[in-house]
Image: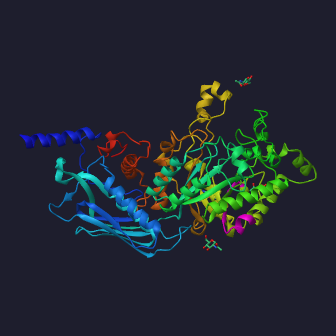
Amino acid sequence: MAKARISLGFLLLFLLSSPLPAARADKRFPVNAWPKPTSMSWAEPHMAMPVSRSFHVVGPSGNAYLLSAARRYAALILAERYRPIVRPAVTVAAGGAELRCLTLAVSDLHAPLEHGVDESYALEILPTGAATVTAATAWGAMRGLETFSQLAWWGDAAGRREQMLLLVASGVRVEDRPLYPHRGLMLDTGRTYFPVADILRTIDAMAANKMNVFHWHITDSQSFPLELPSEPALAEKGSYGEDMRYTVEDVNLIVDFAMHRGVRVVPEIDMPGHTASWAGAYPEAVACAGKFWLPDASDWPNRLAAEPGAGQLNPLEPKTYQVVANVVNDVTSLFPDGFYHAGADEVTPGCWQADPSIQADLARGGSLSQLLERFVGSVHPLIVSRNRTAVYWEDVLLDQTVNVSSSAIPPETTILQTWNNGASNTKLIVQAGYRAIVSSASFYYLDCGHGDFVGNNSIYDDPRSDYDTNGGSWCGPFKTWQRVYDYDIAHNLTADEAKLVIGGEVAMWTEQVDAAVLDGRVWPRASAMAEALWSGNRDAATGRKRYAEATDRLTDWRHRMVVRGVRAEPIQPLWCRTRPGMCNVVR
Ligand SMILES: *[C@@H]1O[C@H](CO)[C@@H](O)[C@H](O)[C@H]1NC(C)=O
Ligand SMILES: *[C@@H]1O[C@H](CO)[C@@H](O)[C@H](O)[C@H]1NC(C)=O
Ligand SMILES: *[C@@H]1O[C@H](CO)[C@@H](O)[C@H](O)[C@H]1NC(C)=O
Ligand SMILES: *[C@@H]1O[C@H](CO)[C@@H](O)[C@H](O)[C@H]1NC(C)=O
């Protein structure tokens, strides 16, 4: 009787602590690693073995980042109580081996974390209880650790629910490497300040998705939240407040946290546009500062800024160059990465034209493009002198009214990030000989489809107009995970052109995002890009887009991310995942 009561207790505990319906076993995706590895096999019949309570990861000494990753993953694996939505159909050999340790073997322990570093790895989990990750670099070994962590789950041996235990798939071989070396997320902390903890959680989730570049769009017209040693006035006068600034210690913490996860941090100080926030400290360096952005709502082409917050650096003003030189020096000292993002998007003609000194220059026969070229031509060498590759938004070359000639931005030291016109602009960039980072607003902008934030807009009067314009969202509709997943960033490029596409970034602009909704706005849509750039969006055997099978896998991965503390949004009701195929349009 006592025995029965104990079992009942366990059963109740299980029922109470499980939010899910009685899961049925699934043979199609019994275990899931996201992004899907390039190649993975699992010997049939599928086996799993218990992970020992003393499980640990043994790695070569000599790389502190790797050793800390090894400790972190061992702790994660032991602590995580991830119960798959659908119970994997596996056999756990009674009295069989336990996994006590995972061994890492790395051939080049000292390869620095930089663009193009080898991230390949192989993972083997033998039924005998031996598991190894073999990689060329520490960063590849970290990718392998992540995959390993996703092959473990909290499950039951042979359906005996009273025996929940930590299991890992065995008889598994993975050979894996990324398709693209640059797999990023851009976060805008200029429109909205995000506490350091939210940035760290985001970077941690990026590493879990094998994304490797955190493009930090730090400043914008709305705020300058970065405390710079040589230019403290910029944050003092340009941030939203004392409690909404990143200190040098914050930056060091973020860069170090990211390094420990194989994630590079590429800083962006957008300039010469998007700089109204600099005017608090240096009003003389900023044209049109403080003016109303849209003096005549019926005359959009002559507006002073792309969105509220007018002001851009004045290239005729000597003070501009003093401040910019200090900014570039400080930022390249703070951020070790080989890339430096120098912005250069959306230089608004109306703003410069509103400035008396620029008006005089134009009257003498100067042009806005010459002004931009003067600015970029003087800042680009500074960036290069700091041993950095300069990244710019494509506008610097492709804007129809204000742009520079390619001599100011040599392709050897320049990468262009595209956001307009989908595949066409990618093609223009690579045909001009530049490496490209793809952030097409039509596919990779995570902010689109949430209406607009500007007030007193008569489109809201007319429900039909509001509807037709996606509620005012300039890049609406919302980019679904399928839209993100299916985009081919090398669409319509020749093989040689495609070689210049180094990867992509989903972009989180934050006019309407803060820490309260960040996770759900980013995840799991960023995961969709992460897989497309890691192992592609097509089935290797048939060459067809694999979004159909990816749906179940992404549901699973989203579920695990939530267990890990990332509040990713759901993509389907549980009903669908627990009834394979039943939610499809065609079975
Ligand atoms: C310049 O950067 C490259 C790549 O990031 C690096 O390999 C090289 O050591 C750096 N050179 C100097 C002088 O810092
Ligand atoms: C660059 O700007 C000039 C005006 O300065 C314009 O004539 C040219 O068409 C622009 N280039 C592109 C690619 O639009
Ligand atoms: C909204 O715009 C109208 C002109 O269309 C103007 O008369 C009115 O004062 C504005 N309202 C507010 C609250 O700014
Ligand atoms: C491919 O690019 C060419 C320009 O080189 C363009 O004319 C064509 O429309 C593009 N096709 C697709 C399918 O995007």
The quadrant of the rendering that contains the N terminus is top left
Q: Would you say residue 356 is visible in this rendering? A: yes
Rendering quarter of residue 571: top left
In the displayed structure, does residue 149 sit left or right of residue 345? left
Rendering quarter of residue 67: bottom left
Q: Is residue 526 magenta?
A: no
Q: Residue at x 75, y 49 (%)?
A: 347
Percent x, y for residue 258? Answer: 51, 59
Percent x, y for residue 249? Answer: 58, 55
Does residue 188 lie above or below 207 as drawn?
A: above
In the displayed structure, does residue 414 sit left or right of residue 263? right
Percent x, y for residue 119? Answer: 47, 68
Does residue 497 lie above or below 582 as drawn?
A: below
For the rendered model, the colour scheme is rainbow
In the image, the segment drawn in magenta is: 381-395
Q: 274 or 515, which lies in front?
A: 515
In the rendered picture of this protein, how many numbered marks are placed on residues?
Answer: 0
Q: Would you say residue 541 is visible in this rendering? A: no
| Residue found at the far left of this picture | 1
Does residue 180 lie above or below 421 as drawn?
A: below
Q: Residue at x 31, y 57 (%)?
A: 152
Q: Residue at x 48, y 44 (%)?
A: 519
Q: Quadrant of ligand 4?
A: bottom right
Q: 569 or 566, which lies in front?
A: 566
Percent x, y for residue 527? Answer: 46, 52
Q: Residue at x 89, y 50 (%)?
A: 362
Q: 489 or 46, which lies in front?
A: 46
Does residue 452 lie above or below 177 as drawn?
A: above
Q: Is residue 394 magenta?
A: yes
| Residue found at the far bottom of this picture | 107
